[in-house]
Image (cartoon, rainbow, N blue to C red):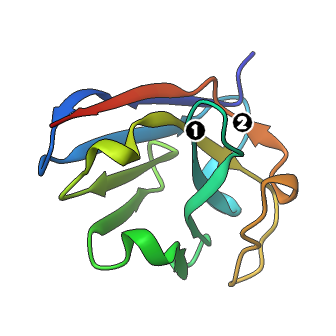
């Protein structure tokens, strides 16, 4: 069973927006930390943002001002919207979760124990 289920992604034109939803499956995803990461071919997986159960967010410098995150506790789902996308943001985007209940989450890949399968986002010029 995949602990975090992603939906959204796909093909977007330069300047467009990405909407991703991440739903916990089999555990209380919204009671702990969550992260979004992306990985382009040949690159390491990199942080997009994290958010704590109380809503404290950390953003990668490259996405500040373009990102909106929200949480829906009854449906165990979190949402991310990234605006003004550029072609170099083409990557596989991953949702991650963890049972960490701190108000400021870690921003490293190794800190997250639950992962989705990823969804491809392709930004065309």
Frontmost of labels 2 and 1 is: 1
Q: Earlier in the sequence, mark 2 or mark 1?
A: 1
Q: Quadrant of residue 100?
A: bottom right
* Residue topped by disc 2: 115
Residue 109 lies, in percent from the top left, at 78, 54
Question: How many circles with numbers are drawn on the protein?
Answer: 2
Tell me which residue sits at (57%, 27%) in the image: 118
Quadrant where the N terminus lies? top right
Residue 12 lies, in percent from the top left, at 19, 33
Label 1: few (<14), some (14–19) or many (≥20) C-alpha neighbours in 10 Å: many
Looking at the rendered structure, the secondary structure element under dot 2 is strand
Say left or right for 120 vs 25.
Answer: left
Above or below 96: residue 66 = below
Q: Quadrant of residue 26?
A: top right
Residue 123 lies, in percent from the top left, at 26, 35
Near-viewer residue (108 or 89): 89
Near-viewer residue (58 or 16): 16
* Residue topped by disc 1: 94
Q: Is the Cβ of the residue at disc 2 closer than 8 Å to that at disc 1?
A: yes
Above or below 50: residue 116 = above
Label 2: few (<14), some (14–19) or many (≥20) C-alpha neighbours in 10 Å: many
Say left or right for 33 vs 82.
Answer: right
Quadrant where the C terminus lies? top left
Tell me which residue sits at (47%, 35%) in the image: 91
The CA span between labels 2 and 1 is 7 Å
Looking at the rendered structure, the secondary structure element under dot 1 is strand
Residue 41 lies, in percent from the top left, at 59, 30
Above or below 25: residue 74 = below
Above or below 2: residue 102 = below
């Amino acid at each position: 069973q995949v602990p975090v289920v992603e939906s959204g992604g796909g093909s977007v034109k330069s300047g467009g927006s990405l909407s991703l939803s991440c739903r916990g499956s089999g555990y209380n995803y919204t009671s702990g930390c969550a992260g979004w990461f992306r990985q382009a071919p040949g690159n390491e997986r990199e942080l997009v943002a994290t958010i704590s159960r109380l809503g404290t967010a950390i953003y990668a410098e490259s996405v500040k001002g373009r990102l909106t995150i929200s949480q829906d506790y009854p449906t165990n789902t979190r949402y991310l919207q990234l605006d003004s996308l550029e072609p170099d943001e083409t990557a596989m985007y991953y949702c991650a979760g963890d049972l960490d209940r701190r108000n400021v989450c870690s921003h490293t890949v190794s800190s997250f124990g639950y992962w989705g399968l990823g969804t491809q986002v392709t930004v065309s010029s």
